[in-house]
Image (cartoon, helix red, strand yellow):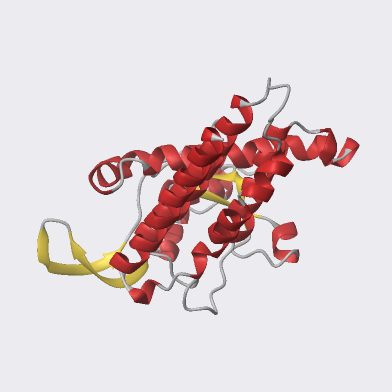
Amino acid sequence: MPADSGYPAYLGARLASFYERAGRVIALGNPQRYGSVTIVGAVSPPGGDFTDPVTAATLSIVQCFWGLDKKLAQRKHFPSVNWLESWTKSLKPLEPFFEKNSPEFPELRAQTAKILEIENQKMEIVQLVGKDSLSDEDKLTLEVAKIIRDDFLAQNSYTTNDAYCPFYKTFWMLKNICHYYTVAQKEILRTKEFATGRVTFAILKDKTDPLLFRLVRMKELEPSDGEEHNVHELNELFNDITKTFQEMSDE
């Protein structure tokens, strides 16, 4: 088995040098100071420490693990990072930024990860007995997970609207997707015990098809149009989701 004694003493320094990116950045607290970007810090995986010294030394620098997935690449899903295997230790240091700019973001991120995790669990059932065996709530989860996978996590670097995604756009896309999921689940559960007028997934999808189409098209907003314009469009979609489900609830 590989051990520290099997590698030269300069392993950590060489890896740090590899991951160090040259760039013109402004140092915090000193706008006149410029330098290169260096990521440092000690981390360990959720399940414990890695025994491979190369992996352990790398994690101590990058503070995250990106699980590249060959199957995603074969499906032309880029970046081909497996969202279930990947993790980061950078959330804690970023808390002050989120609290100042987007207090809702950590919760939205956690809800999104939960939706993808549930989808992964339910797919085993789908492969065995088919999608029709799932409850309406689970069918909705799979539908929203598909939007997250194919229209939020997948990016095309050759298009101007998708090559770069500013944080405000990321935040509002997640907010709208999670908002739709939350209110749709509530509507299904509200009528679950009704003898008549029950809202099934099929009925829900038919009535909210325009909203689903707009959720898919959110990624096509051009960052070059400016934050004010794009936030207005995304906020309008958020309000339309609320209005549509309120009307369904009043029927």
Residue plotted at (50% across, 70% down): 220
Relative to the observer, which residue lies in front, 4 or 47? 47
* Res 189 quadrant in image: top right
- Taking 93 as reference, is 49 above or below it? above
- Taking 181 as reference, is 58 above or below it? below
Instruction: From the top left corner, tell me how far across and down residue 23 is, in percent.
Output: 30, 72
Instruction: From the top left corner, tell me how far across and down residue 46 is, in percent.
Output: 53, 33
Relative to the observer, which residue lies in front, 46 or 140? 140
* Res 16 quadrant in image: bottom left
Residue plotted at (73% across, 43% down): 202
Instruction: From the top left corner, tell me how far across and down residue 234 is, in percent.
Output: 41, 58
Residue 45, visible in the rendered structure: no
Q: Quadrant of the C terminus?
A: top right
Instruction: From the top left corner, tell me how far across and down residue 95 is, in percent.
Output: 30, 40
Q: Is 164 situated left or right of 104 in this image?
A: right
Residue plotted at (59% across, 62% down): 154
Q: Residue furthest right?
A: 129
- Taking 179 as reference, is 196 above or below it? above
* Res 51 quadrant in image: top right
